[in-house]
Image (cartoon, coloured by chain):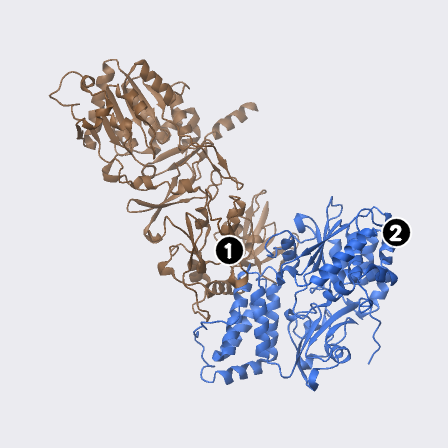
Amino acid sequence: MPQRPEPVLLANVGKPDSWTLRVYEQTGGYQALRKAVKEMTPVQVIDVVKASGLRGRGGAGFPTGLKWTFLPKDHPGPIYMCINADESEPGTFNNRILMEDDPHQVIEGIILSCYATRATTAYLYLRYEYPLCWDRLQAAIDECYAKNYLGKNILGSDFSLDIFLHRGAAAYICGEETGLIESLEGKRAWPRIKPPFPAVEGAFRKPTVVNNIETVACVKHIVGRGADWFKSMGVPPDPTNPRDAGSYGPKLYCLSGHVNRPGCYEAPLGITCRELIDEFGGGVWKGRKGKAAIPGGISMGLLAEQEFDTPLDFNALGKVGCMGLGTAAVVVMDESTSMVDFLYNSCRFFQHESCGQCTPCREGTAWSLRMLERIRHGNGRLRDLDLLLEIGDTIGIIPGTTICGLADGAAWPIKNAIRKFREEFENYIKNTNPTGYMVTEPVPALVQLAAH
Amino acid sequence: MAVVIVDGQEIELGDHERLNGIQAARRIGVEIPFYCWHPGLTVVASCRMCLVETGTKHPETGAITMLPKLVPACQTPAKDGTVFVTNSDKVKQARAMVEEDLLLRHPVDCPICDKAGECSLQDYHFEHGQAERRADVRPFTSRRRDMGDTVTLFVDRCIMCTRCVRFCREITGSSELMVINRGSHEEIDVFPGYPLVNKMSGNVVDLCPVGALCDKDFLYQQRVWYMKQHQGVCTGCSTGCSIYINENQDAVYRLKPRENPAVNKWWMCDEGRYSYRHLHSPVRQIQPRRIAEIGNPGGNGHAGERRPHDITVKHFRPMENVEWSQLPRDLSAQLEQVCRDGGRLAAVVSPHLTVEEAYLLCKLARQFDSNAVLALGPVPIEGHDESFPGGFTIHAEKCPNRKGAEAVIAHFCNGKIKTFNELLEDLAAGQIRAAWISGGYSCAWNGDAIAQRFAALELIVVQDMFESPVWHVATYQLPGAGFAERSGSYVNFNHRLQSFTWAIRPPAGVWVEGQLYWNMLNLRGLYNPRTVLREIAATIAAFSAAAGEIPAVGIDMRMNQLATAASNEH
């Protein structure tokens, strides 16, 4: 077993009162902020973050420093920072750990990010289901105001910042950056068409940066420890993929499902799925074999057991047919799991969470759920698998048929599950519908649907 | 000059044109299907029907680089070098997919749907859809939901284009409509207790590309393919919205706005939209009559002496029917007789008459009495002008042609326009002995006091659609035409002259005002407003802009004057 570096993001987690300013300052808290405000210009902070190769931890993996440079130069302001804490990808809970157990680390990262981007107002969009995060973040923010880490002229500089907590109303789509902005503005969280991108016209029609909680936590450590430290971990760019910017730095992996020790673990990017399961998770539970795993949140697709040696970084997962790393939330399924059930659950989730704006997503997710409902009801046909694949291949931003990526997230589990486990699906249909599985004509719909 | 390439054809766009892919493709007759896009509303690009392939042509090398994915044409600006491909297999597949998706939960109740025949979902399905239904989804039945006084929603027919929602937010600013629920459970709804009540609510029905929002006034009245569509102008107020009149066999079933960027854009108000009902009113006058004694060969002396001046006994006056063919000669004889005796003739030019009719009436009056008094009919004013955030204005002046009638009167009276009240004062002074009163108002426009003034005259000719106190003191009661029955031109509040032809025939052989004037002026054949307008343009400077063909959007009457003024300055 290779020696893993000491956790950095999770360093304070588990300590008594780790969420208080006292404990945070004892472990060197707000030194990075002092250093930046006294010694660095905003441009220098951006340069450090750029040099570190930090990519957004929210799911898309867009280089953070590059995103910041998209802000218009010499804009009269205000520039807004939106912190995406609407962590609703199934299987994901790393932001929650950070906010509950180390909120000051997050806040320091936010202040540094705002300093770099010249944002004077930050909105922290918190998902509804995190009441403890709310309490601890608010307490931490209050502590910061008292110590002048927030407010006017922070630490005697001419930099001022206010952070507002905004509690969402529990919708997956609010995690999409423009959906988040719309929701923040008090509207229905329908993702906006791009361009204009938020960096040009975002919240309240002003330039806006949307960053994930874990991303800003990384910013704190990059400023404090330097870009070289960050780059010492992870995977360099794939020379065969010109669009890969490399996967550097530590990452919080959320391990759940059929493992012995589920939890949030910190490891350098590039750890393989099998290493994660065996080293951190203590192996698949009950002595069973693994069958499949979700590599990074349900929307990223599915890894079959023989693909468990794939590194969990931004580039490698694409090679095995997954969409990407996503939120690095690994959900392990043992050999007793039915892939039909998995796909049904996945489709039910996306059907429920589709915002309903774009036709292909709204109707495609609902149709796929109804087909799976019928398959599970014993009325499946082999043809349904082709229809499901057709839906999976034709919805999403990749073919260009939707505004946001939710449909891609709905499509990838369908594509992966049926392509990687087609035999299981076919057997299921043949066994449950021995007389009708060859029918190709439309079949009657189920009158009653269990799913909503 | 920007050059855009659509399906291999180059289109040149003007320097200041900001078009999207749909509009650019239209220039060469390529139709890109769409649901959610509307030129008057913000772009949401959510229906995904207008997906096309796009790319850019390098200005120097001419090499074309295409984007790997599809983009919505509604959201893609047509810039110099933009390339659109609208007929590739990829595009066709995407359209077929969207069409199939939209029909998944659509009830397909076209046989009982009002929109059938003019439904985008139907049309696009035939053009871009798949022949076979592959879905196993059980469509819902036609759940119906009340939206307000004018509009009803068939919930399951909705395809969630949200045009109606955007209209209420952006054009009327009243925001009654909203989307409730999420994903495939989405529905259009209003907040409980706040129904769709605004003065432009009917437009959401026109905006609806499918049969979800239906007009209660039109619901189940007529299949659209039975109706014929005519271009017209709304007479509800001085805005003069361009409209379509939908009729079947001389019955108007609905009015719809006709796109006119210079007047109403794509909208019209509810007041105008439902202002056609009086055309088919059972109490509308359709029989020309005159007082029985007049023109009786047995009588002697002039008629005025034996006319009952007390209008309370009006109903006891014996009236007799007249043939329309007799009228021109009959009336001419009467008018000549009064004027020969030195009697002054007054003509009331209604702001509901067309420019041509107003001109003919003035000309006619001056033919009998070269000093005839020409007065503008009453101009109904209701409340104040009402403007909406979308730029639409409902005017308080509830007649279509005050500007036009005034310009005509001004020509005949050397710029002096006599108002109706001034005419009433003249009547009291006793100079006037005969009057020709044109009406055409859809609501009551005079009272007993006014009728009393006229009652003293020797000869009163009233042309109107409905009974009124003035009608009852008339010597001649001549039924008039309604707006959908007229041909001619109106000039709106903003000096815009719009021409139109009749959509329906008047009931029971009624002669349109213009036809009677035409015949009395001894012009030959059928009344031809085009000839009259050409004559007006040639004789009245204010109308000089109307000399040529009048485009469907009308012309600005100040156009030539402005041009002249500008050229004089240089």
Q: Tell me if mark 1 has few (under 14), some (14-19) or many (20+) residues whose alpha carbon lies within 10 angstroms of its own.
A: many
Pointer 2 indicates a residue of which chain?
A: A
Q: Which mark is residue B130?
A: none
> Considering the numbered disc 2 on the image, is that residue within a helix, a strand or a loop?
helix
**Which residue bears the numbered disc 2?**
A38
Q: Quadrant of residue A49?
A: bottom right
**Residue A142 screen position, x and y as percent:** 78, 54
Name the secondary structure under disc 1: loop
In the rendered structure, the answer to whether residue B507 lies left or right of residue B107 reads left
**Quadrant of residue B505 in the image?**
top left
Residue A84 horizontal side relative to residue B260, left or right: right
Which one is in front in this view, the residue at disc 1 or the one at disc 2? Answer: 2
Left or right? Give the position of A316 relative to B473.
right
Residue B80, placed above or below residue A175: above
Q: Which chain is brown?
A: B
**Type of amino acid under label 1:** Cys
Chain drawn in blue: A
C-alpha separation, residue under disc 1 versus residue under disc 2:
53 Å
Q: Nearer the viewer, residue A183 or A55?
A: A183
Q: Is residue A238 visible?
A: no
**Residue corresponding to mark 1:** B161
Q: Position of residue B175 (x, y in %)?
A: 53, 47
Tell me if I can see residue A197 in this picture: yes
